[in-house]
Amino acid sequence: MTHGGSLSRARALFPQAPEPWIDLSTGISPYSYPHSAIPANAFARLPEPDAVRRLKEIAAEAYGAPSAAHVVAAPGSQILLPIIAGLCQGAQSAAILSPTYAEHARAARLAGLAVLETGDPAELAAADLVIVVNPNNPTGRVIPRYDLLELAGRMRTKGGMLVVDEAFNDVSAADSIADAAGDGGLVVLRSFGKFYGMAGLRLGFAITHPALAAQVETRLGPWAVSGPALHIAREALSDTAWQAATRQRLAEDAVRLDHLLAAAGIPVYGGTSLFRFIRDARAQSLFRHFGERGIITRRFDGRPGDLRFGLPGPGDWARVEEAAWAFGSKAVGGLTANSAAEG
């Protein structure tokens, strides 16, 4: 299974491309959180339980969880997917609102579940495990809070489980449902690395009923979160001023990228302010055009018309603008030549 963020794969695809590469293949913020110096003992000692407990308290407040007992801290939300699927006791089937992040389907299959990937929300509730990414990656689709709470209630009544992946909720107008996690039958996932621009830190959270949270923590084992991650996340999740300023900065950058692509004749179909989603018959040509110029975007197996652009970093805009302009000029030139030939 391929994912964004692999520059070695980009170099193999486009060996003649100029370097340094500009990686637009992920939805990771180009603005990393400016944390304070990490103390030496964060590396030298095993993480203390008190430090983990304090992080869970801060995360509960930041994400709107009922309490710290509802929060699981993990080395990335990715590792939580197969654990949670495996804890859906008695489950035989999973339904995933698609197209979406492909690891959810893989994790459900690893747990032995029959998987239905569907674009119809009405088909979800028949399964034992339901997974909705909200806002969705890569389309940006948002399911209203009311509909998710209704679905969670239906799953709870029949002993099933709803997993809502809110990995991109930090930059979305979508209402979180983390506050409802105490009712049971619901797991909300949050990712730290995307919004805080620190994917390599590997930190994520599950928010759910305390009994299920305890089971997840048992499977993760001790010291699941590193000392440096604990230090940085406690600061970042408490820094509401930086969060507000960064949301505004990302929103402005997303608008700038939309205008840049539109000027090149590339309409934006959806996304969030951490990535923009293209659905266009020229998507593969666009992928190659940018790749040959050392700019890697995200394409999707089995969906040749889909393409995702992450946000350029502060020093990358000129090259991205130049590549987009060249693509637009080539498209216009081709259209003019075809028109002349027809005439």
Image: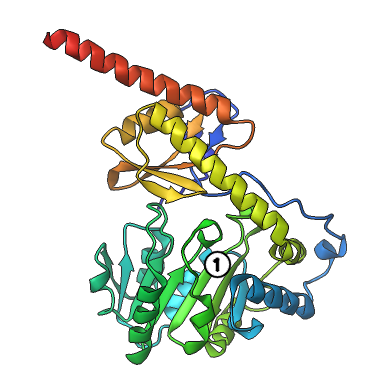
Pinpoint residue 49: horizontal percent, then vertical percent: 76, 80
Count of numbered marks? 1
Q: Is residue 91 left or right of residue 19?
A: left
Residue, disc 1: 190
- Determine the residue located farthest toward the right in the rendered image: 40
Which residue is found at the position 32% from the left and 35% from the top? 283
Q: Is residue 138 above or below residue 135?
A: above
Which residue is found at the position 40% from the left and 54% from the top? 140
Pinpoint residue 319: horizontal percent, then vertical percent: 54, 25
Give the quadrant of residue 281.
top left
Give the quadrant of residue 238.
bottom right
Which residue is found at the position 61% from the left and 61% from the top? 192
Pinpoint residue 176: horizontal percent, then vertical percent: 50, 70
Q: Is residue 293 visible?
A: no
Which part of the image, by quadrant, shows the C terminus?
Answer: top left
Q: Is residue 212 above or below residue 28?
A: below
Pinpoint residue 44: horizontal percent, then vertical percent: 84, 64
- Determine the residue located farthest toward the left in the rendered image: 343
Q: Is residue 86 above or below residue 246?
A: below
Q: Is residue 231 left or right of residue 304?
A: right
Q: How is the image coloured?
A: rainbow
Front position in the image: 209 or 43: 209
Which residue is found at the position 63% from the left and 85% from the top? 69
